[in-house]
Amino acid sequence: MPSPKKVRVAVIGCGVISELHLRCFAHNPHAEVVAVCDLVPERAERAARERAPGARWTTRAAEIFADPSIDAVSICTDHASHCRLACAALAAGKHVLCEKSLARTAADLRRMLAAAKAHPDRVAAGVFQHRFEPLPRVLRELVAEGAFGRLLTAAGSLYTLRDDDYFRKDAWRGTIRGEGGSVLINQSIHYFDLLLWIAGGAASARAYSANLGHEGSIETEDTVAIALRMRNGALGSFVATSAGMRQWETDLVFQGTAGSVEMRDDRLFSLVLADKAAERRVRARVDRALAAGAKLFPKGKDYYGPGHQAQIDDFVRAVRTGARPYVTFADAAESDAMVFAAYASAARR
Ligand SMILES: NC(=O)c1ccc[n+]([C@@H]2O[C@H](COP(=O)([O-])OP(=O)(O)OC[C@H]3O[C@@H](n4cnc5c(N)ncnc54)[C@H](O)[C@@H]3O)[C@@H](O)[C@H]2O)c1
C-alpha cells in the first residue's frame, strides 16, 4: 500500500537543473518540496520564493539531513559534492535522487554504492532521464530480444559547442576537482549511457581524450574517442566533442546480423531488417511505443529531453511504495564505471 502522506522533499543545489526538479516535484501530487538548500544564499532564497512557495531555505545541507520531517533529497549540485551529500543523506535515513554523473571519481562511485547497499530500505536513484523515453526503451527491448539478430556494433556520438563563457560561469566546470572531466562525464554522458544500456551493457572501454578547442580555458577534455567491448560480445565506439560548431547533434546506431536501427537527435532515423515482414512488425511496435510515449510526454522539449518528470514520478512512487526505482544507484553506476574506465585508459597513454 502506498503511504497516503506526501513525500517531503528537499532539493539541494539551486542552480540550472534544480529548476526542472522543482517543477517536476511540484507537478507530482504525492510530493511536496519543503526545503531548498544552496551554498549561495541568494540562490536558495530565490528558488524557494520562485519555485517552491512555502518551502524554507538554508545554506547548510546538514540542517536538511538533521530534520526528521524530511523524507527525501534531490541532489542537484556539482559532481564533486554528490558523494559526500548522498552518503550523508542515506546515513541520515533520507531517500536520495542524485543527478548525473552519480560520482566524480571511481572511488566516490564505490563509496556511494556501498552507502546504498548499507541502507537497502532507502531509495537510492541516479538521474538518467533519457532511459524513461519510449524510443530508447523499445530499442533496448528489441536488441535484447534479438530483433536485429546478433548485435555486431553499437556506435554513438554527440557533437556540441560549449564556449569559454559556459566554463567561466561556474567554478566547478572544466576542472578535474569539480567536474571530474568534461564532455564525457557531463554533456555526452546521457548518450554514452543510452548506447551501453540499449546494447546490453559494456564490459570494457579504451579511450583517447584531448582538449582541442579549449586550451588555456579548461583543464579537462573537450573531445573523446572510446572503443568498447559489450557484455554480449558486440564491439562499440563513442565519440564526443564540446568544441564543435553544432549546438547539439546526437546519433546512436546498432548493427546486427539481421538488421540495424539508428536513433538520431532522439528520433528514429532508420530501421532496416533483412526480413521485410519482420521489419513491418518491428516498425509497428516502435510506432506503438512512440504513440504511447507521446501521451506520457506531451510537453515540448529541449536537449534535456522530456524524461525528468517520469523519473521524478518514478522516484516518488518508489519512496511511497518501497518498490525499486527504475534507475538505482547500481544501474546508473554501470555507465559511470565505464566513464571512469575510459578516463583511466586515456590517462595511461
Ligand atoms: N540530467 C540532465 O540533463 C542535467 C542537465 C544539467 C545538469 N545536470 C547535472 O546537475 C548537476 C548540477 O548542474 P547545474 O548545471 O545545475 O550546476 P549549477 O552550478 O548551475 O548548480 C549547482 C548548485 O549547487 C550548489 N552547491 C554546490 N555544493 C553544494 C552544497 N554542498 N550544498 C548546497 N548547495 C551546493 C552551487 O552553489 C550551485 O548553485 C550536475 O551534476 C550536472 O551534471 C543534469
Image: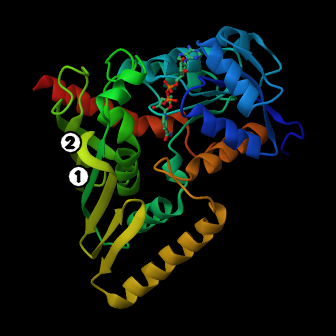
Check disc 2 and report the residue beneath it: 226
Residue 152: give x, y in percent of width and height. 23, 62
Q: Which mark is residue 236?
A: 1
Residue 69: give x, y in percent of width and height. 83, 20
Label 2 element class: strand
- Residue 104 makes an appearance in the image: no
Residue 9: give x, y in percent of width and height. 74, 29
Q: Which mark is residue 126?
A: none
Between 135 and 165, the one nearer to me in the picture: 165
Distance from label 2 to label 1 (Cα)?
Answer: 8 Å
User: Looking at the image, is mark 2 or mark 1 earlier in the sequence?
Assistant: 2
Name the residue: 84% across, 26% down.
Answer: 54
The response on whether ligand 1 sits within 8 Å of label 1 is no
Name the residue: 62% across, 70% down.
Answer: 292
State whether residue 348 is above or below residue 31: above
User: In which quadrant will I find the C terminus?
Assistant: top left
Q: Amino acid at mark 2?
A: Ile
Q: Quadrant of residue 299?
A: bottom right
Left or right: where 185 falls relative to 210: right
